[in-house]
Amino acid sequence: QVQLVESGGGLVQAGGSLRLSCAASGTIFSINVMGWYRQAPGKQRELVATITPGGDRNYADSVKGRFTISRDNAKKTVHLQMNSLEPEDTAVYYCNAGVRQWYAGRWYEYWGQGTQVTVSS
């Protein structure tokens, strides 16, 4: 079993900051790409940012320059520092990771339960 548990969501005024964290636990041999996605009411889930084990980052155009993704491979955690938040950033944010539970095992994709981020104008 693998679990991804997010924390750090909440309510913030426009222009403010929040830091999301996600911790992976369970039987884990290796973690590949980790990332954050979000889903606003009535919209499809969209990519926010991803990071490889080596630290290569990818961001959605809408968050470039405002959000920073980071990870700690030893602690099996990924973080999302969100600055200059806008009302359009309001959504449920989900942690995502590609995980292999055993050596030579298959890779599976896991999701966290989501954490609400609300930005007021």
Image (spheres, helix red, strand yellow):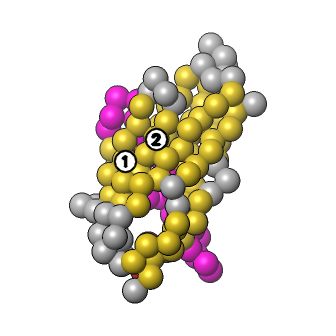
Query: Residue tagged by mark 1?
Result: 69
Q: Amino acid at mark 2?
A: Val
At x 64% / y 49%, what residue is drawn?
Answer: 112
Q: Secondary structure at mark 2?
A: strand
Q: Secondary structure at mark 1?
A: strand
Q: Position of residue 111 (x, y in %)?
A: 64, 47
**Does residue 113 appear in this view?**
yes
At x 49% / y 27%, what residue is drawn?
Answer: 75
Kindly indicate the quadrant of the structure image that contains residue 39: bottom right
Q: Nearer the viewer, residue 1 or 9?
A: 9
Q: Position of residue 103 (x, y in %)?
A: 62, 13
Q: Is residue 43 magenta?
A: yes
Question: Which segment is the magenta one?
Answer: 35-56
Q: Position of residue 3 (x, y in %)?
A: 68, 38
Kindly indicate the quadrant of the structure image that contains residue 27: top right
Which quarter shows the N terminus?
top right
At x 31% / y 63%, what residue is drawn?
Answer: 83
Label whose residue precedes the other's in the sequence (1 or 2) = 1
Q: Amino acid at mark 1?
A: Ile
Mark 1 is surrounded, within 10 Å at the Cα level, by few (under 14), some (14 to 19) or many (20 or more) other residues, namely: many
Which quarter shows the C terminus?
bottom left
Query: Residue tagged by mark 2?
Result: 78
